[in-house]
Image (spheres, rainbow, N blue to C red):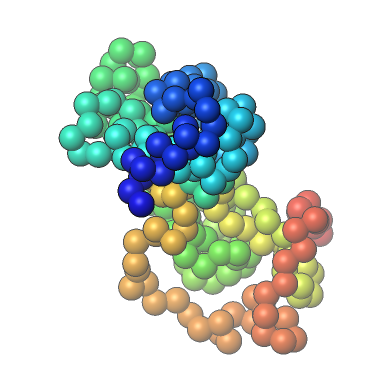
Amino acid sequence: MTDENNVKSITDADGAATIKSLEGAIEAILYAAGYPVKYEKIAEVLGLDVRNTKTLIAHMSEAYNSESSKHGISLLTFEDSCQFCTKEQYAPYIREALGIRRGGNLSASSMEVLAIVAYNQPVTRSFVDQIRGVDSSYAMNSLIDKALIEACGRLDAPGRPMLYATTEKFLRVFGLRSLSELPETEIMLPAKEDLPILQDDDGQLSIDGEDNEEQQG
């Protein structure tokens, strides 16, 4: 069954609701929010189940994101949420109209650290330092401040070092729906046996997601 037929089946099952009014409601919600909205919340508001809500939004995203679309915005869809964002090619017009100074780009060192975290997460600071061969504290802290990476638990190893992973904002900034869409890389990283700090006695990572505070000393 095509997406169009799937969407039509939603209105058949929900009586008076129409595709146009449902899409209009979703547009209004996402426009007003300005941040990712959970499918569960949209489904609750529309009186639909989550599966049908995702189907409807997927149908909308095709119209917004197609190359032939005249819209200046895209509809980003993630695993559990969705969001409107402006298209990259219109950034110069937005900056000029709103008086936004160009800037905010990541430094080369921050991009390097972000790539290491993204492709190997969850990781410790020590892992990143060993890959780069230099102290990465400044770049790590900068990425945390920008909400591109975050603490996600602790490694079950002596000292219980903090583990870090990318955030949902990271996906939005780089236009990804999930980490599976990361481009393939040929970067050669040291074998795990060369990085003993990342292994416990069984050679496995163990994450305690409830303890997210940096260990002192």
Residue 8: image location, x then y, percent: 40, 36
Q: Measuring 33% from the left and 73% from the top, which residue is drawn there?
A: 186
Q: Is residue 14 left or right of residue 115?
A: right
Foreground pick, 160 / 122: 122
Q: Is residue 51 visible?
A: yes
Residue visible at 41% across and 44% down?
6
Q: How many marks?
A: 0
Q: Relative to residue 127, is residue 108 depicted above or below?
A: above
Above or below residue 183? Residue 176 is above
For the C terminus, the image quarter is bottom right
Report which quarter residue 43 is drawn in: top right
In the picture as drawn, the residue positioned furthest to the left comes out as: 68
User: For residue 201, what is the image quadrant?
Assistant: bottom right
* Left or right, 46 with reference to 158: left
Residue 30 visible, this orientation = no
Q: Residue at x 47, y 58 (%)?
A: 179
> How far across and how far down the image is residue 58, in percent?
41, 42
Q: Is residue 116 above or below residue 13?
A: below
Q: Position of residue 24 (x, y in %)?
A: 43, 21
Q: Is residue 199 left or right of residue 212?
A: left
Q: Nearer the viewer, residue 152 or 216?
A: 152
In percent of width and height, residue 59 lies at: 37, 39
